[in-house]
């Protein structure tokens, strides 16, 4: 169900990443739940353009840090694995497969943090990319900040 200010989601999946993304979103106040049902509501006010911009700025800055560390600590094999995500993302985009494109886009960027070998950055990016993946799914496209 879509309306001007909200998106309703019926939570029936038990997949770990979905459950984790929903939990993070509920804890941040991006999702509201009803005690009487498994219905979740995303309020448009929670994702105003300023918040989207702030998330995008954090993404850019953390990716810059991840790139610098990955260049220092990464191997050719790790970068090739990351490149596989880029190829899958491009193929999904050409095929119009939005779900796979979003998933592979986030996986590509998260892989930078994994290559950086900085656990604090990995943990932060994992949480941030759950937000970004959810936001991209909600908005239906890339996270544009300008």
Image: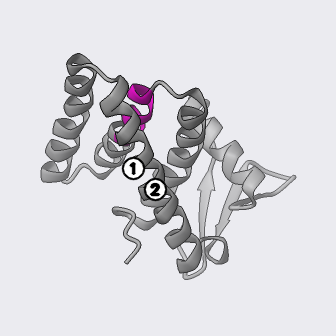
Percent coordinates x, y for residue 104 in the rendering: 31, 40
Indicate whether residue 114 is drawn in magenta.
yes
* Quadrant in the rendering for residue 43: bottom right
Percent coordinates x, y for residue 49 in the rendering: 53, 79
Q: Quadrant of the N terminus?
A: bottom right
Q: Residue furthest right?
A: 35
Q: Is the residue 108 above or below the residue 37 in the image? A: above
Does the magenta stretch mainly form a helix, a strand or a loop?
Answer: helix
Q: Residue at x 53, y 42 (%)?
A: 125
Q: Which residue lies under the disc numbered 1?
A: 64
Q: Residue furthest bottom?
A: 4
* Quadrant in the rendering for residue 86: top left
Q: Residue at x 42, y 37 (%)?
A: 110
Secondary structure under the numbered disc 2 in the rendered image: helix
Q: How many marks can you see?
A: 2
Q: Quadrant of the C terminus?
A: bottom left
Magenta range is: 109-116
Crowd tier of the residue under label 1, counting other residues whose Cα lies within 10 Å: few below 14, some 14–19, many 20 or above: some
Percent coordinates x, y for residue 98 in the rendering: 30, 52
């Amino acid at each position: 169900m879509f309306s001007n200010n909200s998106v309703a989601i019926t939570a029936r999946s038990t997949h770990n990443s979905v459950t984790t993304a929903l939990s993070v979103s509920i804890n941040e106040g991006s999702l509201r739940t009803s005690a009487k049902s498994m219905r979740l509501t995303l309020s448009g006010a929670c994702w105003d353009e300023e918040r989207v911009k702030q998330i995008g700025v954090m993404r850019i800055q953390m990716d810059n840090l991840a790139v610098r560390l990955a260049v220092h600590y990464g191997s050719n094999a790790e970068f090739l694995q990351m490149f596989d995500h880029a190829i899958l993302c491009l193929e999904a985009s050409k095929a119009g497969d939005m779900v796979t494109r979003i998933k592979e886009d986030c996986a590509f960027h998260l892989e930078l943090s994994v290559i950086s070998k900085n656990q604090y950055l990995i943990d932060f990016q994992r949480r941030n990319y759950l937000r970004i993946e959810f936001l991209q799914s909600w908005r239906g496209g890339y996270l544009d900040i300008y």
